[in-house]
Image: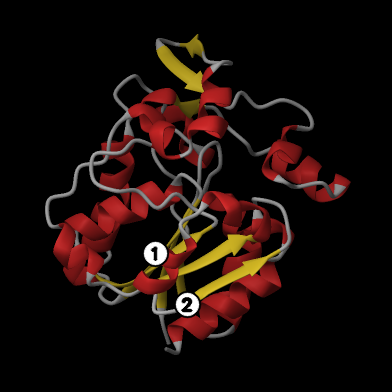
Amino acid sequence: MATFVLVHGGGHGGWCYKPVAQRLRAMGHEVHTPSLSGLGDRKHLLSPAIDLDTHIDDVAQLLEFEDLTDAILVGHSYGGMVITGAADRQPGRVGHRVYLDAAYPVDGESLHEHAFEMIDQARQTMRQVDGVDVVLEPMPGFAAFFGVTDPELGAWTDARLTRQPWKCFAQKIAFTGESAMRAIPESHLICTSTIPGRDMPLLTERSEGRVWDIDTGHDLMLTEPDWVAERLDAIARI
């Protein structure tokens, strides 16, 4: 079966993939759900040094030290920046890139530039905590910002959201081997509401038609775990 590395987005942690990971493991797949430095269960590592490169290294080093090959990298939201960078650094260990309602950057682009309206809104609430400029400050009901509207699931999500270092959103991604990275097959699982802001012809061309959408909230790995797991399993069988 396949090996998945599920990479979360801003303010989240590996915990957000728990429902999808359980389903994929039940199907027989190997699943890794790392929390990026300073986030989730690694929030105690928050420091001014953490930026996009730090998070790309988190995933690239996981691929190397776990000796993973033909891994399916899945990135949600900001995680799209991270898996693109990790695939650029470790193309020989990646067999597929999956963008889960995620950023799809070009070389030299930051998330702030890529998704300006949403990320600039977050920038307006930036504050400093222990010398770190942070955004996405957790508060009761904040799960709704990510499209989690079920009260029970929202409370579970609220309890786990963490602050996001702003430098991760501001730093521009820099490719070192873009042609090799682009040669890795890719697929896109997106929320229907985000289609108007995407270059759908480009996504369809680069993914050879492997683009699926569903009408749900941005945190679709939480709101629609069956659908996400089924699509990922289908991608693994391509």
Residue 126 image point, x, y percent: 52, 15
Question: In the figure, 2 relative to 175: above or below?
Answer: below
Mark closer to the chain start, 2 or 1:
1
Quadrant of residue 206 within the rendered picture: bottom left
In the image, residue 233 sits, relative to residue 50, either above or below, namely: below
Q: Quadrant of the C terminus?
A: bottom left
What residue is disc 1 on?
A: 202
Horizontally, is 225 left or right of 53 in the view? right
Q: Residue at x 71, y 52 (%)?
A: 217
- Residue sitting at x 53%, y 40%: 40
Which residue is at 57% across, 85% downward? 27
Asked whether residue 32 appears in the rendered view, the answer is no
Mark toward the viewer: 2 or 1: 1
Residue 86: x %, y % from top left: 27, 54
Quadrant where the N terminus sits is bottom left
- Given residues 188 and 202, the one toward you in this image is 202
Label 2 sits on residue = 210
Number of labels in the image equals 2
* Residue positioned 46% across, 37% down in the render: 42
Residue 82 visible here:
yes
Q: Amino acid at mark 1?
A: Leu
Q: Position of residue 113 (x, y in %)?
A: 39, 33
Q: Secondary structure at mark 1?
A: helix
